[in-house]
């Protein structure tokens, strides 16, 4: 991942509907959601949502697959992980104690449980996204 990839990813997320879309898709991993359902849940017209999903896909943040007559979208969690890693890669170069609070927050957000232990629970501020 290089500067251009990071700029594309964060540029795509620097718009409210796209950020809400990505967060919604993260909550629906690994199954994903049909494009129409994303539009309905976020209250966004289908053609507008299609444009936003295209931006997220070009930035590598979502992938899609055809399932019968629907297109199912999924968050690309590996791309998200690489983007976050890119941001903090040099954090611990000389002072690892600076990274500890960030790493603890990523591992134990608000409840003290790792993300994998929080399956089925909503992420912070998710009610604002739907």
Image (cartoon, grey):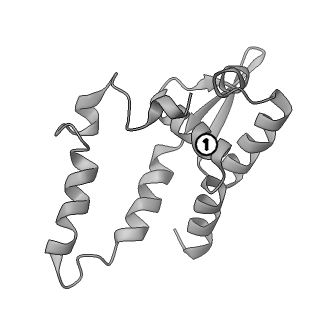
Residue ID at (49%, 26%): 28
Quadrant of the rendered structure where residue 46 is?
top right
Where in the figure is residue 6, as x and y percent of width and height? 56, 67
How many numbered marks have been drawn onto this rendered protein structure? 1
Where in the figure is residue 25, as x and y percent of width and height? 54, 33
Residue ID at (64%, 63%): 8
Answer left or right for 87 relative to 106. right
**Visible residue check, residue 29:** no
Quadrant of the rendered structure where residue 96 is?
bottom left
Query: Mark 1 — residue?
Result: 62
Where in the figure is residue 35, as x and y percent of width and height? 71, 26
Q: Residue furthest right?
A: 47
Q: Residue furthest bottom?
A: 94
**Visible residue check, residue 128:** yes
Where in the figure is residue 113, as x and y percent of width and height? 19, 37
> Quick one: 87 or 41, which is closer to the camera?
41
Quadrant of the rendered structure where residue 21 is?
top right
Regarding mark 1 in the picture, which secondary structure is present there? Answer: strand
Residue ID at (64%, 47%): 16
Q: Residues within 10 Å of mark 1 (few under 14, many from 20)?
A: many
In the rendered view, would you say 5 is above or below 27?
below
In the rendered view, would you say 101 is above or below 106?
below
Residue ID at (66%, 34%): 64
Quadrant of image for the C terminus? top right
In the rendered view, would you say 124 is above or below 84?
above
């Amino acid at each position: 991942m290089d500067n251009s990839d990071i700029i594309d990813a964060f540029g795509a997320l620097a718009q409210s509907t796209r950020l809400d879309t990505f967060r919604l898709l993260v909550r629906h991993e690994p199954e994903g959601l049909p494009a129409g359902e994303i539009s309905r849940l976020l209250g966004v017209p289908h053609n507008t949502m299609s444009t936003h999903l295209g931006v997220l896909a070009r930035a590598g943040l979502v992938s899609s697959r055809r399932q019968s007559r629907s297109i199912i979208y999924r968050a690309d969690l590996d791309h998200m992980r690489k983007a976050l890693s890119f941001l903090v890669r040099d954090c611990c170069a000389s002072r690892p104690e600076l990274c500890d609070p960030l790493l603890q927050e990523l591992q134990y957000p608000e409840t003290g449980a790792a993300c994998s232990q929080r399956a089925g629970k909503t992420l912070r501020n998710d009610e604002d996204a739907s």
